[in-house]
Structure formats: C-alpha cells, structure tokens
Image (tube, grey):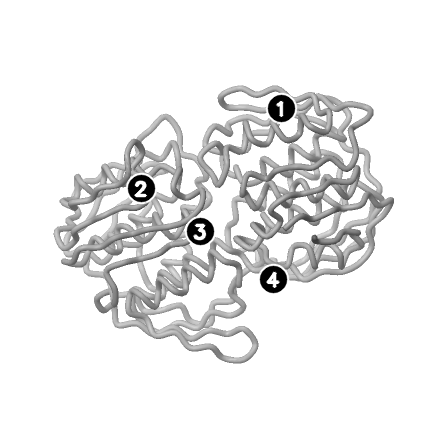
Amino acid sequence: MILTVKPVRSLKGQAQLPSSKSYTIRAFLVASCGGESTLINPSDCDDAKISMNIAKCLGAEIRYRKGNVWYVKSKGQKPQTSVMSVGESGTVLRLLLPMLARHPNYFLVQGEGNLAGRPNTHLVKTLRNMGVAIQGTAPQDSIPLNLKGGTLKGGRLEIDGSLSSQFISALLITCPQLTENTQLVITGDKIVSADYVVMTEQVLKLAGIQIQRLSDREFKISGNQQFKGLKEFAIPADYGLAAFLMAAAALVKSDIVLSGNLDDRFVQADGAILDLLAAMGVKFTKTSQAIKMQGPFVLKGGNFSLKNCPDLVPIVAVLALFAEGKTRLYDIAHARAKESDRISDLRKELLKVGARITEGDNELVIDPQPVYKKNIRLNPHHDHRLAMAFSVLGVRIGAIVEDIECTRKSYPRFVRDLKKIGGKMKKS
C-alpha cells in the first residue's frame, strides 16, 4: 500500500500518543515468568501482539478486561509448543531464546521478513557457553534457530554489548530463574542502547526480581528468584513514536497537543528526542500528561551522538535536511542491524529528493540544501521507522511512501494520528 503525503503550511490538532512497544514486550514476557499481572494500556502494534502470543505459548493465561486492561497469570510452567513464531520482532526473538533454553525440550524459533537478516551471534555464543545446544542460520545465527534446552547454567557469563543491548536484557530476564547465581559481564568496545537495559531492570524490579548492578559492565544476579507479577503496570507512552509527530510539527507552522502517559520514572532511550529537538531550536512544553508545541521554528544543525537511541536516526536525519548548518549523527553503526540498514538505506532514499548526505561506517553527515525535489516516491525497505520518517518529510515537501502498512509493526495508527494534527494524505 502506498501513502501519498501532500505538503502543508501548518499543522494543528490533538492526538493520543501510543504506548511504548518496548515496555509492552518486556511486560508480557516478564509476566509470563510467574505471578499475577495487570497491564494497563499496552501497545497494540504487531510486535506487541507477538509478545502476547509468545507469553501464551510459554504457558501464561491472558484475559482481556475492558478499557485495554490485560490480566496475565503464570505459574512459570513449561512452554505449550515446540515451535515459536516471533514475526518480525527482534526484541521478542532475543528475549525469548534464553527463556526457552531453561526447558529440557527441542525448540524451533522462526520469524518473518527482515528478521532473517538480523544477527544473533553474540547471544548464541553466550548460550552455548551456558551449556545450550543451539544452531542458527549462517553466517550470523539468524532465524530460524533450533535449540535443545534444559542444561542452562549460571556462573560467570560474558556477553558482547557492542551490537545490541537486547542480548543483555535477555539474560537479565532468564538468569534469576536459574538454580545458580550469575555474574554477568558485558564485553565489547562499547555498550549500545544502554537505556534499554535499564528499562528491563525496571520491569524486573516491578515483578519482584533483584538485579545488583555492580558497574555499567557487570551485574550480580541471584538464582532461584520468584517472579511475583506486575501489579497495575500502566505502560508509558512511547517517546520514539512521539518523535515523528513532534518532528512533523517542527517542520511547519504548528499548534499541536500530544497526550499520553509521560511518566518520567520509566526510562526510555528515545526520550532523548526532547533534548535533540531543544538543541535544534524546537520549543515545547511537557507535563506528565501532554506535550504542546507551537511553531514555526528555525532549526539548527549540530553534532549528535545517537549511541543510545539508534531508532531516532531516520527522523533526526529528516529534520537535519531543513536545519541551518550541517548535522553530524555519529555513534550509529548499530543502526545498520535494524529492520533495515538505517544508514545506507536511509541515505539512498534521501538522495532521491536531492539531499546532500554522506555516509561513514559510524555516522551520517547532512548538509542542508535550499531546495528539494517534491513528491518523490520513497522506499522504506520494509522498515517502519523509515516509512514514518519519509511520511514526515512529505509534510514539508510532499512524498509518496511505499509499503506504509509496515508501520503496523510499532504504530498502527500513525497515519490516523498524523491526520489528526493536520496532515494531508491518502492511501492507495
């Protein structure tokens, strides 16, 4: 399906922000480990639905209550099936593998789409060191993966954190259930997306699990812990998705209100969008319930590390096209291993509109131009965040965005919400 976005001079309106995909996935999977949980307003995106289905496959009982409230009950029982389908969710895939490895069964884990190209070697290597027989698809241990569980052991473990923090989160969820204590050491030249590890720690703490953080690179995890469930956990709004609506409002004259559960007690790496927008000259007001913006704004370029928030690369690059002065986005090598190569694929498409953008192994440099080609057809490479970023670009110069339905992965109501704040577009 194609989305044709017409340029507009202004945006005005209100929209309800979607709930966090990342918190929702962690909530359903942690709830499946034991106890009784009540999840309030979880995301209904495709990845979130996959996490709910996997929780059921792991033996959890899940019931819907009115008002988007979900009740999850689990005794930490054995998985109900030997074949697990994780759709296109890299997060679900990686969090699931150690969870399955606890059980003395053979499992096949399969997925769809671009997930087949995403690497899991660092996690697979650690699981093998923990005694698990696991085999992925060469050369990067991608899906499908076969594993034989039941031999998982703790002790001193090492995991490389330079490609994805999801590998760390996966072990933090499973190690408390082992009979042995675990010393988890993070290796690699850097730890990317570190705030997502903090997110996992927060959800585990709500479930009664104690993780002792000795340093940024070392955790002590006691074994034989009991998951007590998540009591009345209201899922916060998703800053990474709010970024697209805020960026649209930053590109034209605007008067918008974005409402949602903006509880800052819960860490989100993509909350960095607020500081990034402020650094680029965008003004807004924020409370625990809403973000308000009134433009127009004069955008400024700058040097921005997106080490902890690679999901923001596409939308910040689009903003940079209209800034005064060059913008350099760096510490982003791990953005290549997402749903698309968010460096090369993003550059390839933005060149079509006349952007001057150079690519390095670990960076993008955007040199704004006075005029861009309008209403150009853009391919998001089946990446939901590229699709949304190109749609926002269309608010300023018009765009024809292919495969817009891929936004269901994280934000199924994206087009509706962009229309609510004044965007002009149609699907065909």
Q: Residues within 10 Å of mark 1 (few under 14, many from 20)?
A: some
- Between the residue at mark 4 and the residue at mark 3, the CA separation in whole angstroms equals 16 Å
**Of 110 and 421, which appears nearest the observer?**
110
**Of 254 and 340, which appears nearest the observer?**
340
Q: Nearer the viewer, mark 1 or mark 3?
A: 1
- Between the residue at mark 1 and the residue at mark 2, the CA separation in whole angstroms equals 34 Å
Q: Which residue is mark 3?
A: 199
Give the residue type at disc 4: Asn
Answer with mark 1 or mark 2, whichever residue precedes in sequence. 2
Answer with mark 2 or mark 4, whichever residue precedes in sequence. 2
Look at 45% across and 32% down and name the residue there.
334
Q: Residues within 10 Å of mark 4 (few under 14, many from 20)?
A: many
Q: Nearer the viewer, mark 3 or mark 2?
A: 3
The answer to whether residue 88 is left or right of residue 30 is right
Look at 80% across and 45% down and name the residue there.
6
Q: Which residue is mark 2?
A: 214
Q: Which residue is mark 1?
A: 328
Q: Which residue is mark 4?
A: 261
Discs 4, 3 touching: Cβ within 8 Å: no
Q: Is 326 located above or below residue 144 in the figure?
A: above
Answer with mark 3 or mark 2, whichever residue precedes in sequence. 3
Q: Nearer the viewer, mark 1 or mark 2?
A: 1
| Label 1 element class | strand
The answer to whether residue 410 is left or right of residue 149 is right
| Label 3 element class | helix
Answer with mark 4 or mark 3, whichever residue precedes in sequence. 3
